Image (cartoon, rainbow, N blue to C red):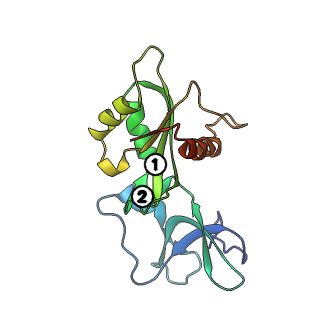
Amino acid sequence: MLGERLQPVAVGTVGDLYIRGVGLSPGYWNELEKTKAVFLPNPHSPDPTERLYKTGDLARIGEDGLIYFHGRSDFQIKSRGYRIELGEIETALHALNCLRECAILAIDSDGFEGKSICCAYVPQPETEVNAIVLRKKLIRVLSHYMVPSLWMAFDTLPKNSSGKIDRNKLKEYFLQQRTTHQSVLL
């Protein structure tokens, strides 16, 4: 586990999980910028060609020497066996030009799929948009596994003290509504 400046963090401290070794991929196929962002020179190695791969996972090493997963540093999840970038779904929704704002998040599923993708949205004024319409539009531009299964319309999305969408509050809403069946499940 490494900190922001690629320095090792203390046992028990959450840091970014990096991997290295002879089996490390040379990078992403035809994705030079993406490769440069996560395949980095190893500052702790005397070999100038040795690299580290930033996994995007947050973890800590316990007193027992085991690695404990603490989530992701980005908005990537795994659902139904697929790796999904939640920001890509938000971008597709915004491109539909029928929402004032939206947030995509994931909550733990009760089933085998791992995570349920949730969409909280605020329609543009005077538009006839609901979860069914949004789902039909998204299916045309995204893979089926990326389309949210839980939907909830809002007049305005909750914000945190810095004015950003409060994703933790939205998760609470979806978890509450899932138990009372008030969100739209598609």
Comes first in the chain, label 2 or label 1: 2
Q: Tell me which residue sits at (63%, 37%) in the image.
A: 164
The residue sitting at the left extreme is 140
Q: Which of the 4 image quadrants contains residue 147?
A: top left
Q: Residues within 10 Å of mark 2 (few under 14, many from 20)?
A: some
Q: Tell me which residue sits at (39%, 25%) in the image.
A: 97
Examine the rendered structure and indicate whether residue 63 appears above or below residue 4. below
Q: CA distance from mark 2 to mark 1?
A: 8 Å
Q: Residues within 10 Å of mark 1 (few under 14, many from 20)?
A: many
Examine the rendered structure and indicate whether residue 184 appears above or below residue 61. above
Q: Position of residue 117 (x, y in %)?
A: 45, 48
Q: Position of residue 129 (x, y in %)?
A: 40, 24
Q: Position of residue 115 (x, y in %)?
A: 47, 56
Q: Name the residue that disc number 2 marks.
A: 79
For the residue marked with disc 1, what is the amino acid?
Answer: Ile
Examine the rendered structure and indicate whether residue 166 appears above or below residue 9. above
Mark 1, secondary structure of its residue = strand
**Contact check, label 2 and label 1, Cβ < 8 Å:** yes
Q: Name the residue that disc number 1 marks.
A: 117
Examine the rendered structure and indicate whether residue 88 appears above or below residue 16. above
Quarter of the image where the N terminus is located: bottom right
Q: Position of residue 77 (x, y in %)?
A: 47, 57
Of 161 and 7, the residue lying toward us: 161
Mark 2, secondary structure of its residue = strand
For the residue marked with disc 2, what is the amino acid?
Answer: Ser
Of 6 and 83, the residue lying toward us: 83
Q: Tell me which residue sits at (39%, 82%) in the image.
A: 23
Q: Which of the 4 image quadrants contains residue 186?
A: top left
Of 168 and 24, the residue lying toward us: 168
How many circles with numbers are drawn on the protein? 2
The residue sitting at the front extreme is 180
Q: Tell me which residue sits at (55%, 82%) in the image.
A: 45
